[in-house]
Image (cartoon, helix red, strand yellow):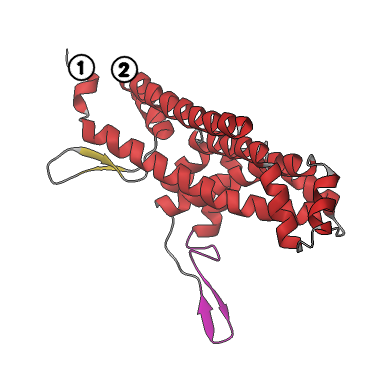
Amino acid sequence: MMDPLSEFGSRYLVSVVLVTLQVSLTAVGISTVVSLAISLTMSFVDFRGERAVETVINTGMGFPSVVAGLGVLLLLSNQGPVGGGFAVGPFRFGGVELLFTREAMVVSQCVLAVPVITSVSLSAIEDVDQSVRDAAFAAGGTRRDVQLTVVREARYGIVTAVLAGFGRAISEVGSVLIVGGNIAVRDSSGELVSLTRTLTTAITIEARRGQYEVGIALGVVLLVLALGVNAVGNVVRARGERS
């Protein structure tokens, strides 16, 4: 009987891993910038509806991934404002074909990662003692200087937030399956390579095919990646705490 693992060469596995890392790391990078901007704004600026925004953020931490994927699908489809475009008078905007691409997968992962990173970062920033802000202001610092000081003090909590966001992104199945299409094709040499297939969606399709050996192998790789990234984050955080 043919070994199921022999159907797939190392190039297939490498391509799936690279797509997974490219999409997840890009999404987490963008989400971190957006989340820090939101967290700092909410921490330093009082505005009406602040409680409502916090409620939305906390709700977003448990937002169903398939709903997020469906929303991005509608946004990027031919009938959506981005995919189909929209007209303002004689001018037409949009019409960008992003559906079933890695870019669409990044968007869907950002939707899921931003609330997680924002919530944990906001908590870390608000936990910084008020005396730190007062000292920065007293030293003649501008608002930006004070914000940078607060971020520096809250950096360990922010690292935790980024790691949590990465875990949310790399473990995602539903939304990336909807907007990415789980596409893999054969190259000129006849070897299977991933276009939009990630480790999680690959595990799903192999389990449905009954190829449990392949699914387990992919699962082990996913687990090693997740543990590796978290280990690096913990090492960085530990070194910072000792310095």
According to the picture, the residue beneath numbered tag 2 turns out to be: 213
Task: Decide: is 216 above or below 182.
Answer: above
Mark 1 surroundings: few (<14), some (14-19) or many (≥20) residues within 10 A: few
| Mark pair 1, 2: CA separation | 9 Å
Residue underneath mark 1: 3
Q: Position of residue 68 (x, y in %)?
A: 59, 45
- Residue 190's place in the image compared with 232, above or below, is below
Residues drawn in magenta: 77-93
Q: Quick one: 24 or 200, which is closer to the camera?
A: 24
Q: Which type of secondary structure does the marked residue at label 1 adopt?
A: loop
Amino acid of disc 1: Asp
Q: Is residue 212 left or right of residue 145?
A: left
Viewer can see residue 151: yes
Q: Which quadrant is home to the N terminus?
A: top left
User: Between disc 1 and disc 2, whose residue precedes?
Assistant: 1
Residue located farthest toward the bottom when viewing the structure as drawn: 90
Q: CB of mark 1 within 8 Å of CB of mark 2?
A: yes
Residue type, label 2: Glu
Residue count near mark 2 (Cα–Cα under 10 Å), binned few <14, some 14–19, many ≥20: some
Q: Position of residue 170 (x, y in %)?
A: 49, 36
Horizontal placement of 32 versus 135: left or right?
Answer: left
